[in-house]
Image (spheres, coloured by chain):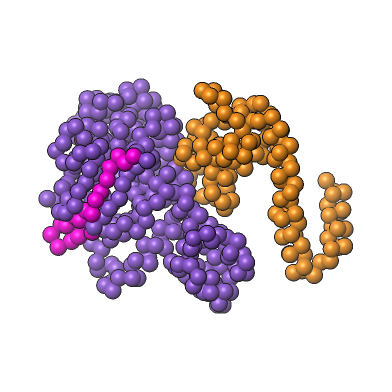
Amino acid sequence: MGRPAGPGVNEDGGPIFRQVATQIENAIVDGSLPEESQAPSSNELAAFHRINPATAAKGLNQLVADGVLYKRRGVGMFVAPGARDQLLKRRRSEFADQYVRPLLTEAHKLGISAAELAAMIDREEDRR
Amino acid sequence: MTATATVHDVTMRFREHTALDGVSTTIEQDTITGLLGRNGAGKTTLMQLLTGHRVPSQGRVEVFGGRPYENDDVLRRICFIKEGQRYPEQFRVRDALAAAATLFPDWDEDLAQSLMRDFDLPAKRTVKKLSRGMNSAVGIIIGLASRAPLTLFDEPYLGLDAVARQLFYDRLLADYAEHPRTIVLSTHLIEEIADLLERVILIDRGRVLLDTDAESLRDSALTVSGPSAAVQAFAGRHELLHTETLGGHSRAVVRLGPGADGEDARAAGLAWEPTKLQQLVVAMSLQTATDQSAPPSATSPRLEEVPR
């Protein structure tokens, strides 16, 4: 990153508003932002990520459109009931596309069989 | 969106030099707009026209619905922090700020005081004895505390270190979020401000190359790399801006056609990453340089500084 300091957002992860939305989703999935708790405001997100407030607002609005957050007029945005389950369901359905397929592609390139791959996964799982 | 300023088919000539050539653009209300381009591209001239410091040779400039030149009604709503702005030498810092406070109707003294502490500015020191960085800080404080409905910063950070620049960005964002207004920011440190921008205007040799919202720009260009033949084939289907080749391996900056994205590059067997704003600006500026028949260095004199 060219700027002097600060947390920022991942430069290579698609549009910034999408990254802002993903980070809030992550917080909901890992439980640090529980259902019915208040999400950060667009100004807070803008200041933290050092991005334009309009971009931050776009990320929040996307989550409202997805039903992950809901608005309380004059108060702010809150995590919708059932948001965590909804996100888990979506991420599970995307898991094969995002992780398993690229893994198999690389494994084939290197001549690693599916059985060897499964053995590797077992070994890694034991190590955790 | 409403426009704070519109520039309609504006040409600006200085003797034989054309600083702006048929420029049309709008500055949208309550956005942070980045005005980008090389030295001598015409950025400062455009800002001078927007702030009534000059009258266009041809065309029309309107700010807040009126022409800015000698128009007090418009000018009191504008704050222009010029590159390397000098304040009267015998003034102390506090005198410079007090003078600014009388000029701008929306001046916020509390903000000015808190920025003075942030930037560690000695209130009683005379302007003559300020370092370059301190002088720049005075400009930044005036620009922010003016809360002017249209505030323009032209390369505001001569001599400012990375910490002070970060302070400027953070305070700008925080105050803009609380008090939305139209900000125009011209700088060469593009990567530092890329994420702060909502709009981007890129000018080169007096013409507008890009005039768009920052978010869509981010998705509009890719840097792809891989075997030269594959890179060339991919670039041929889009708009090639810049390419470099080593051995049989090429890297290219490509503006994507409508509906295309990184998946198309991956499908073509290429590695890809989003092109950063700075790389895009460089690639586009270099492209126009090679498009011109005349040698670039000979035709880009910095005549913007010619006095009237």
Give x and y (percent) for residue A53: 47, 37
The N terminus of chain B appears in which quarter of the rendering? top left
Q: Is residue B286 left or right of residue B57?
A: right
Residue A42 shown left or right of residue A27 in the figure: left
The number of numbered badges drawn on the structure is: 0
Query: Quadrant of the rendered structure where residue B100 is?
Result: top left
Q: Quadrant of residue B260?
A: bottom right
Identify the residue shown where x is 59% and y is 41%: A21
Q: Is residue A43 at all visible to an observer of this figure?
A: yes
Prevailing secondary structure class for the magenta stretch in the rendered image:
strand
Give the answer, above or below, for where B259 lies relative to B171. Answer: below
**In the rendering, at what x and y percent does residue A13 appear?**
59, 51
Q: Which x, y percent locates residue B27?
A: 32, 44
Asked whether B19 falls inside the magenta stretch, the response is: yes
Tell me if B261 is positioned left or right of B173 in this view: right
Residue depicted at x 35% and y 58%: B209
Rendered shade, chain B: purple
Q: Is residue B271 visible?
A: no
- Residues in magenta, as a range: B2-21
In the image, which lettered chain appears orange?
A: A
Front-most of B183 and A74?
A74
A62 or B47, nearer to the observer: A62
Which residue corresponds to the image point at 57% horizontal and 40% vertical from the top-left?
A62
The location of residue A71, given as percent across then percent down, is 57, 28
Q: Answer left or right for B20 relative to B137.
A: left
Q: Of B119 and B21, which appears nearest the observer?
A: B21
Identify the residue shown where x is 70% and y is 40%: A87
Magenta region includes residue A92: no
